[in-house]
Image (cartoon, rainbow, N blue to C red):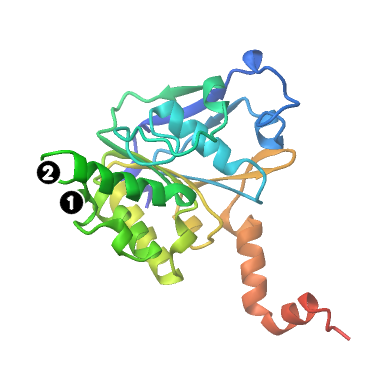
Amino acid sequence: MTLYMQGREPFLRKIELDRSRVPSFGQYPFHLGPIRKLSELPFHPGVTYIVGENGMGKSTLLEAIAVAWGFNAEGGTKNFSFSTQATHSELHEYIRLVRGTRRARDGFFFRAESYYNVATNIDELDRELGGPPIIASYGGKSLHEQSHGESFFAAFMNRFGGNGLYILDEPEAALSPLRQMAMLARIHELVRQNSQFIISTHSPILMAYPGARIYNLHPEGIEIKALEETDHYIIMKEFLNNKDKMIRELFGENE
């Protein structure tokens, strides 16, 4: 699997936090454990995962990377400039991107929580602007005329064109396990087309890309883990292998 990435430099080599400029490590988002301990974070040329429990700052970190790269805070490509509500943090102002020598020809920031806003903006732009419709790049059918999962998958399959940097925040949110496996195959296709991914996820299926780097965010900082060492994998495996016992423990029916 790593054959496709031998000798390949990533579009984004790493990020560095300019700690000297941080106003206070006691205020959001700098008080979050992983960010409070952050100096630099190198990225895999193919796939890097950002995992951990809710509240550890995964989405905040991905958002900062995306905004610093030039993406709209609510998602989409660099060409999207809409804003429904300015809720993103100021973290992007304090991180420095260390870019590789290769130039990305494509890119997309996908965040599940605001993808509805991206879909709405596409429809609005296609009504207002002349020329080829934007929705043609997403499969040709309004994303609002599809289920949540179908519209997510349409972007992954149609809009992502290769030779790009793709930053994905919980893309599994509306995908069935089967679609998650199909997405993993799509990620592999795009990696073979010289793409780089940075993905925040809770899905052990999506985390399974061979040779990927997995960063686990926890209250004391950030550590590299193998898939089999992540809580997501361990808990899911334990539940599936011992379902009845786990159900009894959850329901307090051990006795």
Residue at coordinates 45% horizontally, 23% vertically from top-left?
Answer: 98
Q: Residues within 10 Å of mark 2 (few under 14, many from 20)?
A: few
Residue at coordinates 83% horizontally, 79% vertically from top-left?
Answer: 252
Amino acid beneath label 1: Ala
Q: Which quadrant does the C terminus fall into?
A: bottom right
For the residue labelled by badge 1, is the local secondary structure a helix, a strand or a loop? helix
Relative to 142, say whether 66 is above or below. above
Q: Residues within 10 Å of mark 1 (few under 14, many from 20)?
A: few
Q: Where is residue 142? Give x, y as percent.
A: 25, 57
Relative to 124, say whether 180 is above or below. below
Q: Is residue 89 left or right of residue 8?
A: right
Residue 3 appears in the picture as rendered? no
Residue at coordinates 24% horizontally, 34% vertically from top-left?
Answer: 105
Q: Where is residue 36? Give x, y as percent.
A: 70, 29
Q: Are the residues tagged 1 and 2 within 8 Å (C-beta)?
A: yes
Residue 117's tag is none
Residue marked by disc 1: 136
Could you say which is closer to the camera, residue 182 or residue 108? 108
Q: Where is residue 32? Give x, y as percent.
A: 70, 35
Q: Where is residue 25? Give x, y as percent.
A: 72, 24
Q: Is residue 132 left or right of residue 30?
A: left
Residue 132's tag is 2
Residue 155 appears in the picture as rendered? yes
Q: CA distance from mark 1 to mark 2?
A: 8 Å
Amino acid beneath label 2: Pro
